[in-house]
């Protein structure tokens, strides 16, 4: 008993820390808080820059010029570190020929660049110039990144890294066999604002800049790639100021990766907008879904379907919109399910044996419950923000994996089955994910 009490006290002493590491709940036979280690999996991106500059346009009409030399023919991409649309850059060779015409520093990389990002540089000397529009001034930072200096990665090997500062670019390169079926598999994301894109051996864009952790983009099917070296660009967006953490792997079917499948729905939401789940006219069968139904809700993002009372049992659920469980409402799912919008618990219960993945936000605003043996994965931002000492009850063998950013706020806490639950429940903070304990409650993890 003394040993258990010591562990509880240690949790209380650490509860005001923004990010927790290596925390285990008092009784590991009933519950646990686990943190995936960075060490076995982390691969911090090397610095692939062949040129970088920081400076300041301090006066009207000022132009800064930088000369650099490359010894062999190379392919580079531009990495802007400056969120100032009034500052511009261009690139010329030793003959004065324009290689890159004037571009704004806010429209030079990632989704803000309207053309292919690859710039071919023959061996020689170049001049990069920076100026400002009209009377504008301001500081700047920029880099040129050599694709051949990208960090080498291998298929089916997990990578954990971060974009820091938040608007820089990381480069990775892997060799495709020419016969394997490849997938980009994002397994963890938190913080920042990042996109990824993929270049083939000829520097064509196989994948245009796409938001990492966006519903439908977590697992990108690249099909069978032609043999050669592919460059994966992880790009912080120009306005991003916070670090972006992520974990991913380039998976193959030969390596055992299986594509998540969506069942054929037997009952589909036909309501013109969001509304009450228990209204029969909102469903294609004219009947509220039952335990034998594979349910589909294809409403656009921002719409919300609500379950406010009763117990709803379904076989599976694929939901593109937001879903809210409130009051005494319970939703049980038997098979794997996905909520691509937000999941809101305002007193409700989510249970069952089916694995549930939430790609959007997970918000808990009143005492609520996660229960059952089906795993629960949150990929975006999770907020457990409960007042009056309320809690999120995680019980019945529920294994919750946070792959994004989870914040326990207000004065609420996470209750892992108390002392009465005889089935182990757990929270795993995936590598690259963030757990913030900002609650005023003395025992945020119970």
Image: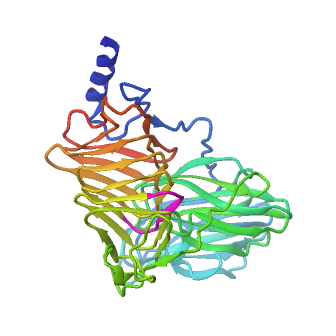
What's drawn in magenta, residue-wise? 333-342
Q: Nearer the viewer, residue 387 or 352?
A: 352
Q: Is residue 1 magenta?
A: no
Residue 231 seen anywhere in this rendered image of the structure: yes
Residue drawn at the location 39% of the way across and 31% of the way down: 422
Q: Is residue 335 magenta?
A: yes
Residue 62 vs 181, above or below: the answer is below
The picture places residue 134, in percent across and down from the top left corner, at 38, 84
Residue 135 seen anywhere in this rendered image of the structure: no
Residue drawn at the location 76% of the way across and 58% of the way down: 253
In the image, farthest residue toward the bottom:
272
Residue drawn at the location 47% of the way across and 45% of the way down: 373
In the image, farthest residue toward the top:
2
Would you say 371 lies left or right of 345 here?
right
The picture places residue 192, in percent across and down from the top left corner, at 43, 59
Q: Nearer the viewer, residue 105 or 5?
A: 5
Residue 300 vs 415, above or below: the answer is below
The answer to which quarter of the image holds residue 223 is: bottom right
* Quarter of the image with the C terminus in it: top left
How many numbered marks appear? 0
The answer to which quarter of the image holds residue 273 is: bottom left
Q: Nearer the viewer, residue 112 or 418?
A: 418
Q: Nearer the viewer, residue 338 or 168?
A: 338
The picture places residue 157, in percent across and down from the top left corner, at 69, 47
Q: How is the image coloured?
A: rainbow
Magenta-drawn stretch, dominant element (helix, strand or loop) = loop
Residue 134 vs 433, above or below: the answer is below
Would you say 172 lies left or right of 310 here?
right
* Quarter of the image with the N terminus in it: top left
The picture places residue 200, in percent across and down from the top left corner, at 75, 69
């Amino acid at each position: 008993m003394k040993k258990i009490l010591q562990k509880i006290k240690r949790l209380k002493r650490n509860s005001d820390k923004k990010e927790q590491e290596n925390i285990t709940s008092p009784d590991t036979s009933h519950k646990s808080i686990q943190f995936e280690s960075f060490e076995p999996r982390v691969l911090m991106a090397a610095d692939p820059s062949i040129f970088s500059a920081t400076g300041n346009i301090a006066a009207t009409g000022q132009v800064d010029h930088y000369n650099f030399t490359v010894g062999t023919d190379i392919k580079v991409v531009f990495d802007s570190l400056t969120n100032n649309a009034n500052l511009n850059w261009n690139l010329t060779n030793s003959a004065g020929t324009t290689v890159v015409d004037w571009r704004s520093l806010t429209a030079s990389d990632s989704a803000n660049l309207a053309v292919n990002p690859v710039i071919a540089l023959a061996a020689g000397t170049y001049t990069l110039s920076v100026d400002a529009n009209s009377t504008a001034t301001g500081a700047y930072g920029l880099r040129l990144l050599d694709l051949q200096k990208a960090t080498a990665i291998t298929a089916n090997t997990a990578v954990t890294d971060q974009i820091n500062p938040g608007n820089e670019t990381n480069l990775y390169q892997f060799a495709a066999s020419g016969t394997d079926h490849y997938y980009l598999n994002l397994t963890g994301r938190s913080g920042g604002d990042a996109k990824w894109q993929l270049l083939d051996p000829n520097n064509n864009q196989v994948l245009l800049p796409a938001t990492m952790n966006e519903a439908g983009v977590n697992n990108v099917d690249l099909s069978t790639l032609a043999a050669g070296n592919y460059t994966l660009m992880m790009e912080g967006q120009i306005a991003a100021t916070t670090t972006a953490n992520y974990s991913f792997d380039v998976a193959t079917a030969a390596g055992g990766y299986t594509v998540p499948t969506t069942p054929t729905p037997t009952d589909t939401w036909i309501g013109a907008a969001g509304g009450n789940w228990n209204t029969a006219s909102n469903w294609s069968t004219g009947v509220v879904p039952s335990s034998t139904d594979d349910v589909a809700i294809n409403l656009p993002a921002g719409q919300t379907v609500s379950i406010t009372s009763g117990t709803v049992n379904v076989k599976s659920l694929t939901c593109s919109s937001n879903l809210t469980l409130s009051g005494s409402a319970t939703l049980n799912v038997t098979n794997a399910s996905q909520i691509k919008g937000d999941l809101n618990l305002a007193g409700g219960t989510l249970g069952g044996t089916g694995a549930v993945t939430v790609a959007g936000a997970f918000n808990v605003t009143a005492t609520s419950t996660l229960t059952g043996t089906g795993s629960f994965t949150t990929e975006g931002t999770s907020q457990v923000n409960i007042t009056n000492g309320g809690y999120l009850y995680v019980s019945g063998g529920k294994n919750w994996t946070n792959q994004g950013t989870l914040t326990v706020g207000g004065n609420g806490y996470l209750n892992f089955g108390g002392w009465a639950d005889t089935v182990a429940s757990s929270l795993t903070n995936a590598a690259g994910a963030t757990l913030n304990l900002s609650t005023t409650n003395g025992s945020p993890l119970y």
